[in-house]
Image: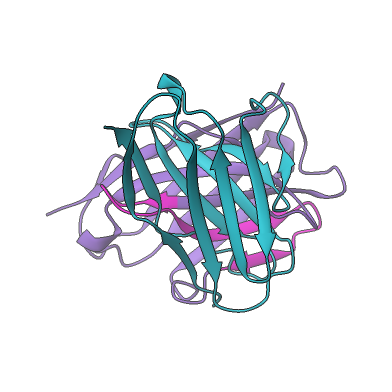
Amino acid sequence: QITLTESGPTVVKPTQTLTLTCTFSGFSLSYSGVGVGWIRQPPGKALEWLALIYWDDDKRYSPSLKTRLTITKDTSKNQVVLTVTNMDPVDTATYYCAHSRYGDYYFDFWGPGTPVTVSS
Amino acid sequence: DIQMTQSPSSLSASVGDRVTITCRASQTIRSYLNWYQQKPGKAPKLLIYAASSLESGVPSRFSGSESGTDFTLTISSLQPEDFATYSCQQSYSSPYTFGQGTKVDIK
């Protein structure tokens, strides 16, 4: 049974760096073909694809946010970490992590999401 | 980036209605199109992948089809639990962009 859970601060100040952790079970990022991605959704708006990391440390980023995003994995802890630098109020959203497979690229298992508000 | 345009942005329907939602890609994505259902306050749920393959456990009233760069999600007979927002996603080329969503509510 695959599960994922996001964790991190619920409020950050403008210009600060956001660090979110996705902790998962039921699979390993040492398995060939496995990936974990991050997606966000501002209140009342559409889903936005952010980043994806694969078992072989291949990383993909949204070009519009690439300079601000870093995705890493800790295989021993079953965790994936997303950092977003220079946070702005427009980054206020619910952030989701999700399981994916190389070659498919859709997300078949999702975490419940974690809300992040950017406010001074 | 590949742009995904959904229509309509919202619709009102009754239980038992046949509902169709369309997603158009800005360029070819072959069959790399996925559909998700999202209810308020919940994470999206994968319904259909590769344009027409039903995810395990998803009711057969949901179906997907494609014609070139146009993709369709059909709910054959709308049920009370189907009132939600539906989003498409292309998985052909990174960044794997989503459509803006279609909200289905009760008429």
Residue drawn at (48%, 51%) of the image: B21
Residue drawn at (69%, 27%) of the image: A2
Q: Which residues are magenta?
A: A40-61
Question: Residue B69, image x and y in percent?
Answer: 63, 71
Q: Chain B is shown in which shade?
A: cyan
The quadrant the N terminus of chain B occupies is bottom right
View extreme (right): residue: A32
Question: Residue B80, image x and y in percent?
Answer: 41, 20
Residue drawn at (31%, 67%) of the image: A86
Q: Is there any visible trace of residue A108 in the rendered image?
A: no
The quarter of the picture where residue A15 lies is bottom left
Question: Residue B53, image x and y in percent?
Answer: 75, 43
In the displayed structure, would residue A7 be above or below residue B101?
above
- Residue B30 lies in magenta, yes or no? no
Task: Using residue B103 as the reference point, say whether residue B69 is left or right of it.
Answer: right
- Residue A42 lies in magenta, yes or no? yes
Tally the marks: 0
View extreme (front): residue: B17
The quadrant the C terminus of chain B occupies is top left
Way the structure is coloured: by chain
Q: Which chain is purple?
A: A
In the displayed structure, would residue B34 be above or below residue B44?
below
Q: Is there any visible trace of residue B77 in the rendered image?
A: yes
In the displayed structure, would residue A28 be above or below residue B101?
above
Residue drawn at (62%, 55%) of the image: A72
The quarter of the picture where residue A71 lies is bottom right
Task: Using residue A40 as the reference point, say whether residue A92 is left or right of it.
Answer: left
Along the line of sight, the residue nearer the viewer: A120 or B65: B65
